[in-house]
Image: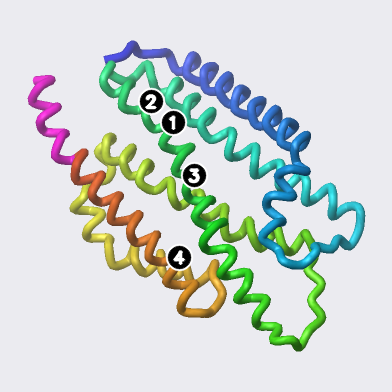
């Protein structure tokens, strides 16, 4: 086992790591802002119409919002690494190696989640909502509304795709087990269905496109927890 640290030393270490995380986010935010033109043109390419703005404040607001999302993506592995360094003294050598794998997993799952939402879900939902106008309105789409609509779809999926890593971590700690997750399957499916209906337009196709990946993620989480749960008795026997 790792060495024990005094409580005040823990607080000092936590403060130092929070400062590192905050500083990395600010640096990432500034860096993304310097390249925000490229981010804007890439994300705006999904709109077939030219996006409008209502004033100069909208430009700054949109650029800061896009830069913040980019900084969040960049900061995820840094947050994961600092969290790992914080708990590292209390872990065994094997636990340190396993926990370190969470860092790239968090980053890649977040990217997979927002990529799935951006390339698959967002175009379908965006075209569906525009199709509701049915020629009854003169469409003037503001950049603010366009990016708000996009981020409301993509960001939740980036976070929801972290579910397997969270379940893996909690299973290693013994807080979750496959039996508990299996018993929670029905209420979990209901909650995931509510999430999918809430963040999608009111059509069956959009709901299915969202709910299926969420259910698959939950089942993957159960399988991961089952694997960890089977290994725990063997590890305990080896330590004994």
Q: Are marks 1 and 2 in contact (CB under 8 Å)?
A: yes
235 relative to 223, above or below: above
Looking at marks 1 and 4 on the same chain, the residue that comes earlier in the sequence is marked by: 1
Where residue 72 sits, quadrant-wise, is: top right
Q: Residue at x 67, y 76 (%)?
A: 130
**Spatial separation of the CA atoms under disc 1 and disc 4:** 26 Å
Where residue 2 sits, quadrant-wise, is: top left
Q: Which mark is residue 110?
A: 3
Q: Which mark is residue 103?
A: 1
Q: What main secondary structure does the magenta stretch of the protein show?
A: helix
Would you name the residue on which mark 4 appears?
210
Q: Residue at x 69, y 86 (%)?
A: 134
Q: Are marks 1 and 4 in contact (CB under 8 Å)?
A: no
x then y, percent, for residue 120: 51, 61
63 relative to 147, above or below: above
Looking at marks 1 and 3 on the same chain, the residue that comes earlier in the sequence is marked by: 1
Would you name the residue on which mark 2 appears?
100
Specify the segment rendered in magenta: 229-240
Q: Residue at x 22, y 58 (%)?
A: 182
**Spatial separation of the CA atoms under disc 1 and disc 3:** 11 Å
Residue 14 inside the magenta-drawn segment? no
Q: Which mark is residue 22?
A: none
**Spatial separation of the CA atoms under disc 4 and disc 2:** 30 Å
């Amino acid at each position: 086992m790792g060495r024990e640290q005094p409580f005040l030393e823990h607080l000092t270490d936590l403060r130092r790591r929070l400062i590192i995380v905050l500083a990395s986010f600010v640096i990432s935010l500034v860096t993304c802002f310097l390249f925000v033109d490229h981010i804007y043109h890439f994300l705006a390419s999904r709109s077939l119409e030219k996006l409008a703005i209502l004033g100069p404040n909208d430009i700054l607001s949109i650029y800061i919002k896009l830069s913040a999302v980019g900084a969040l993506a960049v900061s995820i592995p840094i947050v994961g690494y600092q969290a790992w360094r914080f708990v590292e003294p209390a872990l065994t050598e094997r636990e340190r190696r396993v926990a370190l794998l969470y860092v790239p997993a968090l980053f890649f799952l977040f990217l997979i989640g927002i990529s799935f939402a951006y390339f698959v879900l967002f175009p379908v939902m965006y075209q569906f909502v525009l199709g509701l106008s049915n020629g009854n309105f003169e469409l003037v789409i503001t950049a603010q509304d366009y990016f708000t609509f996009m981020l409301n779809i993509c960001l939740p999926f980036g976070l929801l795709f972290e579910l397997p890593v969270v379940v893996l971590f909690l299973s290693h700690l013994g807080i979750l087990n496959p039996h508990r997750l299996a018993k929670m399957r029905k209420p979990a499916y209901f909650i995931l269905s509510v999430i999918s209906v809430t963040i999608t337009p009111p059509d069956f196709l959009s709901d299915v496109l969202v709910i299926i990946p969420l259910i698959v993620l939950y089942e993957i989480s159960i399988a991961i927890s089952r694997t960890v749960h089977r290994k725990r008795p063997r590890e305990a026997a080896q330590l004994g």
